[in-house]
Image (cartoon, coloured by chain):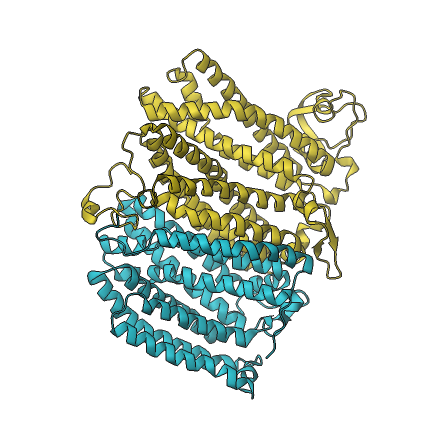
Chain colours: A yellow, B cyan
Amino acid sequence: MFDHADAVLLARIQFAFTVSFHFLFPSFSIGLASYLAVLNGLWLRTKDEVYLTLFKYWLKIFALTFAMGVVSGIVLSYQFGTNWSVFADKTGPVIGPLMAYEVMTAFFLEAGFLGVMLFGMNRVGPALHFAATLAVAVGTFISAFWILSANSWLQTPAGYAINAAGQFVPADWWKIVFNPSFPYRLTHTVMAAYLTTALAVGGVGAWHLLRDKANRGARVMFSMAMGMITVVAPLQILAGDAHGLNTLEHQPAKVMAMEGHFQSHPDGAPLILFGLPDQAAAKVRAEVSVPKASSLILKHDLGAPLAGLDTVPRADWPVVPVVFWSFRVMVGMGLLMGLLALVSLVARMRRRLYDWRPLLRFAVAMGPAGFVTVIAGWITTEVGRQPFTVYGLLRTTASAAPLDAPAVGASLLAFIGVYFIVFGAGTFYILRLMSHPPHPGEAGLEAGRPTRAAGIIPGGATEPEAGR
Amino acid sequence: MTVSIDLATAWAFIIAFAVFAYVVMDGFDLGIGILFPAFKPGPERDSAMNSVAPVWDGNETWLVLGGGGLMAAFPLAYAIILPALYAPIIAMLLALIFRGVGFEFRWRDPRHRPFWDLAFTAGSVVAAFAQGVTLGALLQGIKVVGRGYGGGWWDWLSPFSLLTGASVVIGYALLGSTWLIMKTQGPMQARAYRQAGWLGWATIACIAAVSAATPFLQNGYYQRWFAMPNVLYTAQVPLLVVVGSGLFFLNLRARRQAAPFLLTLGLFALTFAGLGISMFPYVVPTAVTIWDAAAPASSQVFMLVGAAVLIPIILIYTGYAYWVFRGKVGHEGYH
């Protein structure tokens, strides 16, 4: 088996599979950590029990999400070496330190205070416990900062030199960290994490409101989530537009693939809404397009010329149909989020936020939308920068480890099997927790774990796992 | 042996520190996983797991620092070692997934708790064994061609690497049992004392076997250990192992609470020092030295500034997290 397969292709599938699975968890836990910090702060400030209820409710889901994020993340930090060793040798001096800073400033902070956040409320008192929750939330953001800096450097390399051994070596750390696409990617990704979380929280709130519109916990979480979406969704559309313009400047071939522009358009490029890109024939079949609208969006000028993939050597093309469609999924979902923002705002102003069933059903349907959108967005940007690992400088085919196809094939099968079992079970447990309505006196993580170091007497050991 | 402290040497020590911190800290977590089937389902298993639940995540982070630090400070070594050890490293990563989610999933699904407990144990055993195999395979040497690995995907497999694999499983189990001596009481602690007794003997046997085999791996290790005048220094290591082992059994017999764990840490530190004597200054014995593999000074300095400030801070708040969850788990509570 796999004897005749392409080892590099298998390694790419393995990386795509493991990184896609991984990113589902941080895109939820970045937002959820901040949400928990807000709930914790509101509870300390107002002493309103509903915030404590919601804190404990989402803390259980956070614990599961975070654990899955950690274990799937370690895979990635080693996979650079196991499967992409040439890439690791060449880029290690530049992106290695960025990731080392991520470990030293973020991972330890998160991991060190996670135990206190999850189990320590009775041990350290509310103020220190809140500090631990804040530390975890800040840690998730710092982590995003460094890893997105590293990713952005690979997309838009800057501040480097190349040494005699063919390695990228740092010349200017400021330019490396704050490379051209970094501010855009950071903003876009962190807002995506907030939106993903708000949609999930809103979906859960709406689900319970459809069953019991008087549930106070469900009302508060739904209102907070819709408020967040109303603010962030429009901002995210603006940030996405700015990110697109940045990409046009630094990675034009990616934008050509996103737009399906095989040909150059010297006087105004059409906006292709739908179509079937045919990479071999270099054209889009069954095209539905708006004349000159692409130039309007990308150049803010109807008649502006736009170059197409015909100006790029074929060997440097990304896989156009994948980028084209993943981009449309992302944008389509983004527009639906904008619609949800608008509809919920109208409902709020008409005081129908908690009982207008079409809105609640829409919010439930949009519950998983953030995850779909985030993955579609990453597929757009990562497939769109192919065939390079360091954009324009190091080809993917020249980055792989000297492994035989059977080795990579075997590990790929193992990853697929393990991920579906483990993360399938984890997702099921999260959904099951979400299906319980929040209620006053919500169990925390200490309850039901009587022997937890956080200290509740063992008499509880025989109690059923109620409410967990 | 004179060691001039240059950047590469400083980073070699930092990464060695991270790896050591990982080995002893996740070592006792994994050890508890290895010993897990010996605990009765119910309160015993719950207390065993609770004794590490608040800290395991931080412990595992040292593994990320070790790996990430290696890529950043010695990218060439990272690029050679990881493909060479492909199978054991992938096995370790998959095993750590089962181990890690075991902490959470067993509480979420009482009906399938036996399954997740089994996953926790299997994950711990496989991860420990794979780490030991990795160590053995590195010591016995890796075939290097140009700037990459030049061997096949089963080259790591040898009697020696299987020996080191088994040794690490046993050593981690000893760490786990002595940790439980510290963290539990009553019948569970009594069992931990008994386990630590025979695991102590087994660990010492493993140290002896690996130490006896290493000089004959023909990577110049024999010279380092036995040539004059080096032998005057190197002989201190086995001597201290003997002294440490004696103290360990004395303290075990005296039913001391913390000393067995601390002395086990000491034994691990000595074996780690022995490893350093065998390897230094090679990072891939005997093909690539730390200077061959070093990233440029601009990379190493950039990180060193951060590491010098951040690692002490990390140690302080990690210490705080341990302090919050100090004392025995289970019985009575603490407030």
Across and down, in percent, residue A323 comes to 63, 36
Where does the image place residue A317, in percent across and percent down from the top left?
A: 71, 41
Query: Which residue is painted at 43% across and 32% down in the image?
Result: A38
Q: Residue furthest right?
A: A266
- The residue sitting at 46% across, 26% down in the picture is A366
Give x and y (percent) for residue B62: 48, 57
Residue B40 falls in image quadrant: bottom left
Q: Return the residue found at the far bottom.
A: B228
A21 on left or right of B8: left
Residue at 50% over, 82% down: B234
Look at the picture and state if A158 lies above or below A37: below
Is A187 drawn above or below residue B241 in the view shown?
above
Q: Is residue A364 above or below residue B210?
A: above
Q: Nearer the viewer, residue A385 or B328?
A: B328
- Point 44% across, 23% down: residue: A363
Image quadrant occupied by the C terminus of chain A = top left
Residue B149 appears in the figure: no
Count of numbered badges drawn on the protein = 0
The answer to whether any part of residue A103 appears in the image is yes
